[in-house]
Image (spheres, helix red, strand yellow):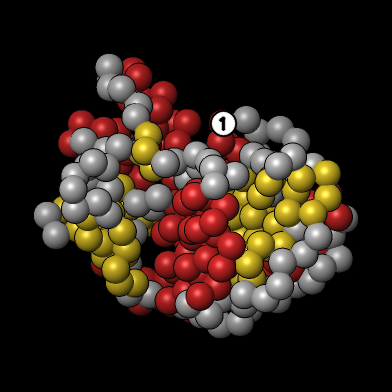
Amino acid sequence: MDRLVVVKWGGSLGARPHGGSGPADLAAGVLGLLAAGYRPLLVHGGGPEITRLSQRLGLEARFDQGMRVTDEPTLEAVIMALAGTVSTRLVASLVQTGVPAVGLSGVDGGLLRARPADPAGRLGLVGEVGAVDATPLEALFTAGLVPVVAPLALGPAGPLNVNADLAAAELAGQMAAGHLVLLTDVNGVVVEGALRQRVRISEVDGLVAAGQVQGGMIPKLDACRRAVAAGVGRAHILPGAAVLHLAAVLTGEAPDHLKGTVIETGEGGEAHVA
């Protein structure tokens, strides 16, 4: 599975489809991966859509260190947005552009099983993936299809909301992927005004504790660290515009401004101004 590339597409990119990061551009990037002999597996976010739907339902959007606090009404909104609107629209765009995509959630076939992420209950119905059953994905790959996974998981009492970055990392780690790619609306990991081209997994806790990374970047770094520690070849945090050049990024042939940040076990690289 070293040709397996797990790509997480951030929901904010779909909310602002410009600058080379909309669904049609994602499709072009995936077609490039297929042409280069890679096996793509997509995981999508949907934060903006969840927030919009929550607001329409009169629900308050609350976050704790980049994680959405999820009570029962919010979970309903999460399910409707992720497994409904976001998944259907994204798969439709992919198929229309020639990608043989099939949408499913982490609940389908028991793909992702989770336990409550916060035993103290602060996060509510948010899950931490504890097991991956890749059987549904293997069936899709065998049929020549591209899986598109909505980040929900099966918990002890029903569905749980799962952070999309962490879901992608667990899938990448359990399936021994060659690469984990997190596409987002920032250039990469920025520390003290400089874009870090490389971050060692041993640095992550220190960066968070010092407040040098905050908000949604915290689960992204945690996801990359988990994936690399589990044996994934390389983890990348990339700007949305890199979606058109995914194959080139993986081979190191992309322009410097699209290479983002690589998270690895070895020595960190030099920083340059973002």
Residue 257 in view: yes
> How packed is label 1: few (under 14 Cα within 10 Å), some, or many (20 or more)?
some
Q: Is residue 172 above or below residue 237?
A: below
- Judging depth in this view, the residue of 99 and 269 nearest the camera is 269
141 or 202: which is nearer to us? 202
Residue 241 visible in image: no
Report whether 258 appears left or right of 265: right
Q: On the image, which quarter does residue 12 sit in?
A: top right
Quarter in which the N terminus is drawn: bottom right
Give amino acid for label 1. Ala
The number of numbered badges drawn on the structure is 1
Q: Secondary structure at mark 1?
A: helix
Q: 218 or 17: nearer the eye?
A: 218
What percent of the width, then of the height, locates residue 208?
52, 50
Residue bearing mark 1: 15
At which x and y percent is residue 253? 86, 66
Residue at (51%, 75%) from the top-left corner? 229
